[in-house]
Amino acid sequence: MATIRPMRPTDLLRISSTNLDHLTETYNISFYLEYLTKWPELCQIIEGINGEIEGYSKLESSPYPSPMTPYNPSKASKSDPNYLPWHGHITALTVAPSARRLGHATALSSALERSSDAASAWFVDLFVRRSNEIAKELYRKMGYSVYRVVLDYYNDGEDALDMRKSCSRDERGECVREDGEKWEVRAEDVW
């Protein structure tokens, strides 16, 4: 049985096998270290019974203050449609090809969602390549929906889907939308 545990700096030397997929974004070690420094409790590893790292996830919490107090999602979307309220953002979540379809992505996502909910976030979001049908289906099954399309988001020019799932604070579901694929923004407008 696999175990989720906090990521340690030494794990960064052991995660390369999880990134062996053309749909997985890879980052340099300084990027991972920045997350471990800022949000150590939100960086997690899933380790197999043999001690091998089978996946990892990194979540960041939004540093931006609300443009209005108290925050109202309906009013804020009209005054500043690109503003992101207090939320959890899954920056990276990947599972080694040899450990896929074992529920690891769901387990890692659920742990990050619980952390966001405990921090009173409005929602959890993530970006997924428009062409990544497997990931899109996985996240839809977990309750995520497309909020908007981020044009030319990836280095190769591919668009990203900004997928969101409301946390319990968003009781009326105002931070998600049904027709998100109709809403397009430029990558430089996402903050």
Image: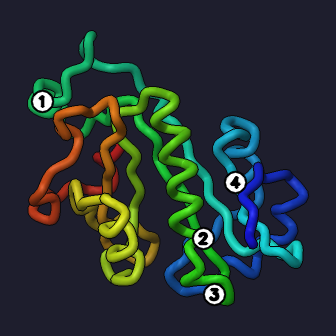
Residue name at image x 19 percent, y 29 percent: 73
Q: Which residue is mark 2?
A: 104
Residue 185 vs residue 26: left or right? Answer: left
Q: Which residue is mark 1?
A: 74
Residue 81 screen position, x and y as percent: 17, 37
For label 2, the SS is helix
For label 3, the SS is helix
Comparing 17 with 45, the one in front is 45
Residue 191 screen position, x and y as percent: 37, 41
- The amino acid type of the residue labelled 2 equals His
Residue 100 screen position, x and y as percent: 59, 83
First in sequence: mark 1 vs mark 2: 1
Circle 3/circle 4 CB separation < 8 Å: no
Is label 1 or label 4 in front?
Answer: 4
Circle 3/circle 2 CB separation < 8 Å: no
- The amino acid type of the residue labelled 3 equals Pro
- Dot 1 alpha-carbon crowd within 10 angstroms: few under 14, some 14 to 19, many 20 or more: few
- The amino acid type of the residue labelled 4 equals Gln
For label 1, the SS is helix
- Residue extending furthest toward the top: 69
First in sequence: mark 3 vs mark 1: 1
Residue name at image x 23 percent, y 40 percent: 175
- Dot 3 alpha-carbon crowd within 10 angstroms: few under 14, some 14 to 19, many 20 or more: some
